[in-house]
Image (spheres, helix red, strand yellow):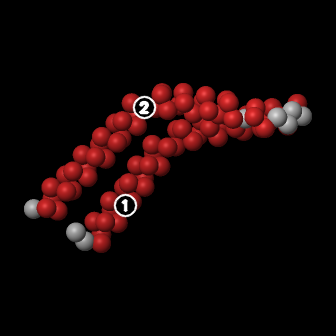
Amino acid sequence: MTIDLVIEILSESFFAVLIILLPILGAGLIVGVIISIFQAATSIQEQTLTFVPKIIITAVAIIVALPFITDKLISFTHKIFNLIVTVVK
């Protein structure tokens, strides 16, 4: 196992994590900005107002993105298993 192979595996894993988490974090970010604008416009300074919608939207985003996440994880696992077979030979 060479350094180049390790760097390639690490870069692919970081990219896979980024691609998997991007829809979930994006949904939370958009909801957070919308709620912050609403709070600034109405002068409501309730701290718990931001948590409940973010939790609900994050759960919905995870459920909606679950097939995409599963597909990405399965393809990444296949790549890693193929690399293991290649390195062991």
Q: Is residue 42 visible?
A: yes
Residue 41 visible in image: no
Residue appearing at x 78%, y 38% in the figure: 47
Outermost residue to the left: 89
Q: Amino acid at mark 2?
A: Leu
Crowd tier of the residue under label 1, counting other residues whose Cα lies within 10 Å: few below 14, some 14–19, many 20 or above:
few
Q: Quadrant of the N terminus?
A: bottom left
Q: Is residue 19 left or right of residue 2?
A: right
Q: Residues within 10 Å of mark 2 (few under 14, many from 20)?
A: few
As measured in the structure, the alpha-carbon distance from the residue carrying label 2 to the one carrying label 1 is 23 Å
Q: Which quadrant of the figure has residue 69?
A: top left
- Tell me which residue sits at (76%, 32%) in the image: 49
Specify the quadrant of the image occupied by residue 72. top left
The residue wearing badge 1 is 10
Q: Say which mark, if any, is on residue 66.
A: 2
Q: Is residue 48 left or right of residue 14?
A: right
Look at 67% across and 29% down and name the residue there: 53
- State the image quarter where residue 45 is shown: top right
